[in-house]
Every structure is written in structure tokens, then in C-alpha cells.
Image: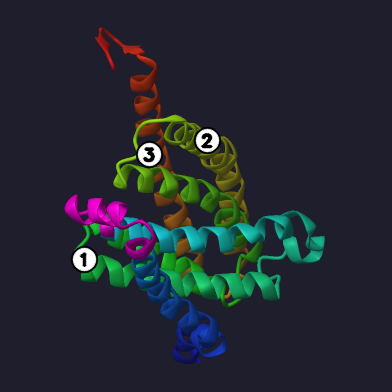
């Protein structure tokens, strides 16, 4: 029985959602290489710049990430509008959230392929593995309301960051567009991931630990994985936020201690 339950946690999400997962995985490659073909044809000088500066891969990866972020942002309305009995139940099932989670699982499978194929640093591997595991376990279904929050709201700042980095990769680092995208990204990241995300995570920790102690959880291992992943994500957010503040200080010419940052 123990072995059967563990296999159920591993196998059942894939068996019940393989169409969405595999379609998303293949779709990521279509977007990646399709974006390359369109960019090469539509703006050849920009593509030439991307290749000369070795930024083409990052530009294309961020194209895929943008599509994923726009899809997950559609979860935001349901975070508020779904019936309370679904929102307040850790096992509350919402078909649309299930679909978006399966798309995210396929996306993070592709993301792990990118990490392996392009030999990206180990930190990217860790991020991809944690995200894949959390999204995959959510297909049980599990913590759909929290998926609507973290996927829906957090990915808004990811899309803005991608656009900002893509402008950098294309060499468009002057002018009002670059400035305003950076400002809107910084504000969105601060509000969503720090001012709202950290308090929400603290509340959710209490909620998850209560479920863990109740003995009613389908898997304590899965809850621990979610808690560890959430902690790691918030630590990363604080590290990234510090970088955003330092960058903002440089742009505004602020002084830190006796050293002027400019």
C-alpha cells in the first residue's frame, strides 16, 4: 500500500495531464525556434547584434518565458472569484488552474532542457527543479489557490524583467522605453514579491504546517518540499530585491555610506 501511494504521487499527475504537459513542452521549442526565425527575418540587424554579442539564446529563452508568464497571469481573476469552498480547501480542484499547472510543468521541463543543453549555472538547475516539482505535485490536485497566487502574480514581474533584459540584449539601453520598463519592473517586483508575497508566504507557512500536523495531508514529504521551495524562492527574491535597490541607487546617484554609487 505504501509503495502504491508513492507511485500514485509520481505517476498519476502525468497520466492524467500528459496532453497538456507534452503539448506545452513541444510548444516551448516551437516558440523558441519560431521567435528566432521571425526575429531573423523581421529585424535582421537586431538579430545580427544578438549573435555578435552572444545574446541570442537568452533573448529566445526570454521569449518563451514571456508567453508562459502571460498564460499564468490569467490565473489572477480566479484567485479572487472562485467560490470560497474551493479557495479555502488545500485540495480544492479548479479545472483551469489544473490546465495552467500542466502547461507550467511542460514549461519547466523545457527549462531544465535549456539548463542542460546550454550548460547554465547550477543555480538555474536548482530553480528549475524546484519549480517543476512544486507544479507537478500541484496536479494531485494540491494547493491550487496558492498556485493561482504565486504563478499568477509573481510571473507579472518576470514578464517585465524579460522585456527589460531583452532590451539590454538588443542594445537598446537608452531612451524612455528602457527607463520606464525598468521602473515599472522594479515597482511591480517590490509590491508583488516583497510587500505582498512575503507576508502571504508567512501566512501560508502557518496554513501548510497546520495541515502537516493535522495528519490529513496526502503526503508530508510534498508539504515539506513546498515549504523548502517557498523559503528558497523568498530568499532569492530578497537577494534580487537588494540588487534592484542598488541599481536604482546607481541610477539616482545615491550615496551608500561614504561611497557614492553612480
Q: How many marks?
A: 3
Query: Relative to 255, is 15 above or below?
Result: below
Quarter holding residue 58: bottom left
Mark 1 highlights which residue? Answer: 118
CA distance for labels 1 and 2: 30 Å
Query: Mark 2 falls on what kind of element?
Result: helix
Give percent across and percent down for residue 36: 34, 66
Is residue 27 located in the magenta-colored stretch of the structure? Answer: no
Q: Earlier in the sequence, mark 3 or mark 1?
A: 1
Q: How many residues crowd mark 3 within 10 Å: few (<14), some (14–19), many (20+)?
A: few
Q: Which residues are magenta?
A: 39-56
Quarter occupied by residue 253? top left
Q: Position of residue 35 (x, y in %)?
A: 39, 66
Residue at horizontal 64%, vertical 69%? 97
**What main secondary structure does the magenta stretch of the protein show?**
helix
The residue sitting at 21% across, 57% down in the picture is 51
Residue 32: which quarter of the image? Answer: bottom left
Quadrant including the C terminus: top left
Tell me which residue sits at (36%, 13%) in the image: 254
Q: Is residue 219 visible?
A: no
Of the pair 248 and 236, the residue shown nearer to us: 248
Q: Position of residue 73 (x, y in %)?
A: 60, 57
Q: Which residue is mark 3?
A: 240
Q: Nearer the viewer, mark 3 or mark 2?
A: 2
In the rendered structure, the answer to whether residue 162 lies left or right of residue 18 reads left
Q: Earlier in the sequence, mark 1 or mark 2?
A: 1
Task: Report how far apart the C-alphas of labels 3 and 2 lie in the structure.
Answer: 15 Å
Q: Please check the rendered image and state whether residue 49 is part of the magenta-colored stretch, yes or no.
A: yes
Task: Pick the residue in front: 59 or 209.
Answer: 59
In this image, 123 relative to 133: left or right?
left
Q: Which residue does the numbered mark 2 point to in the structure image?
A: 184
Which label's residue is closer to the chain start, 3 or 2? 2
Amino acid at each position: 500500500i505504501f509503495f502504491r501511494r508513492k507511485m500514485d504521487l509520481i505517476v498519476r499527475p502525468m497520466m492524467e495531464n500528459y496532453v497538456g504537459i507534452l503539448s506545452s513542452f513541444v510548444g516551448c521549442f516551437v516558440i523558441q525556434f519560431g521567435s528566432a526565425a521571425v526575429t531573423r527575418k523581421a529585424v535582421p540587424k537586431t538579430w545580427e547584434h544578438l549573435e555578435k554579442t552572444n545574446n541570442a539564446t537568452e533573448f529566445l529563452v526570454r521569449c518563451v518565458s514571456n508567453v508562459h508568464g502571460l498564460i499564468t497571469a490569467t490565473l489572477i481573476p480566479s484567485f479572487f472569484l472562485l467560490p470560497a469552498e474551493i479557495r479555502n480547501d488545500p485540495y480544492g480542484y479548479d479545472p483551469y488552474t489544473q490546465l495552467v499547472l500542466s502547461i507550467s510543468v511542460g514549461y519547466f521541463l523545457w527549462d531544465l532542457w535549456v539548463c542542460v543543453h546550454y550548460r547554465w549555472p547550477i543555480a538555474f538547475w536548482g530553480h528549475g527543479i524546484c519549480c517543476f516539482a512544486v507544479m507537478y505535485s500541484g496536479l494531485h490536485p494540491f494547493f491550487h489557490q496558492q498556485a493561482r497566487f504565486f504563478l499568477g502574480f509573481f510571473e507579472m514581474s518576470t514578464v517585465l524583467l524579460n522585456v527589460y533584459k531583452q532590451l539590454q540584449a538588443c542594445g537598446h539601453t537608452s531612451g524612455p522605453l528602457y527607463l520606464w520598463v525598468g521602473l515599472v519592473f522594479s515597482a511591480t517586483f517590490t509590491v508583488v514579491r516583497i510587500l505582498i508575497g512575503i507576508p502571504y508566504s508567512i501566512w501560508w507557512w502557518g496554513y501548510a504546517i497546520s495541515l502537516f500536523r493535522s495528519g490529513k495531508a496526502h503526503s508530508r514529504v510534498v508539504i515539506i518540499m513546498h515549504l523548502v521551495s517557498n523559503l528558497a524562492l523568498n530568499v532569492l527574491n530578497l537577494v534580487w530585491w537588494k540588487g534592484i535597490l542598488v541599481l536604482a541607487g546607481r541610477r539616482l546617484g545615491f550615496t551608500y555610506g561614504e561611497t557614492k554609487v553612480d
